[in-house]
Amino acid sequence: MVDGRKYYYTDALTFPTMYRDAFIDQANDFIHSGNHAPVILDCGSNIGLTVLRFKQLYPDARILAFEPDPLIFECLAKNIKEWGLLNVELHQAAIWIDNDGITFNADHATGGRIVDGMRELIEVPTIRLYDLLDAPIDFLKLDIEGAEHRVLPDCGVRLGNISSFIIEWHFRADEKQNLSAALLTVENAGFRYNIHHCWPVRVNRKWNYKDDQLVSIITIHGRQRD
């Protein structure tokens, strides 16, 4: 029990960090200036703490929440029911560039991602983000553990249907760096943006990273130009 609520989770080590990000640091908060209930895409919902926070901010919001890891998704569904949240549509699927399904590297915590690796490999459904952007979206939260490198450019001009977003961008030692191309996509869709470095606190100045090691994470905050 935290704040009088019951929480279901899969990993006790990462729960405090997720809770702090959502409710103390309010890292995913956004301002909705419209006179209608916002439509929110929560891509990488994990156990649903961001969903709960969005509902605190905008109780009438319509939220589409996506989480591919089946064990985490089970907790997500239990939490949404436990908290009595309405108008939340849950999808046990990975956000990707097609709807054909894919191999997913599940860690049942916060690092599950679309890639081969040493953890548990499972097949999961996929949903193309591009297809979800055929109508106005008030806010996009994109935290998909590296898949954003492929997903964001695939959206192209349809990003212009989003009013504002927060994207976690992950850098890994063995991957080509393509942040500049992604930012160009964002600029061409009409956004102003700022970038915040969120992990790690200290930079590895020796550059002695292992293959596939997560090097750093930044967040990109975007909002359509007025």
Image: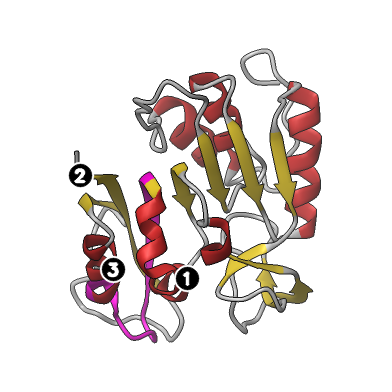
What amino acid type should be assigned to the residue bearing mark 3?
A: Thr
- Marker disc for residue 151: 1
Looking at the rendered image, the quarter that the N terminus falls into is top right
Residue 122 location, x and y as percent? 77, 75
Looking at marks 3 and 1 on the same chain, the residue that comes earlier in the sequence is marked by 1
Please provide percent x and percent y for residue 29.
40, 32
Q: Answer with left or right where residue 132 lies relative to residue 181.
A: right
**Residue 148 located left or right of residue 76:** left
Residue where numbered disc 3 is placed: 185
- Label 1 crowding class (10 Å Cα cut-off): few <14, some 14-19, many 20+? many
Q: Which residue is mark 2?
A: 225
Residue 108 colored in magenta in the image:
no
- Extreme-top residue of the structure: 4
Instruction: Name the residue at 81% across, 36% down.
Output: 78
Between 126 and 26, the residue placed more toward the observer is 126
Q: Which residues are magenta?
A: 163-180
Residue type at mark 2 is Arg
State if disc 1 and disc 3 touch (CB < 8 Å). Answer: no
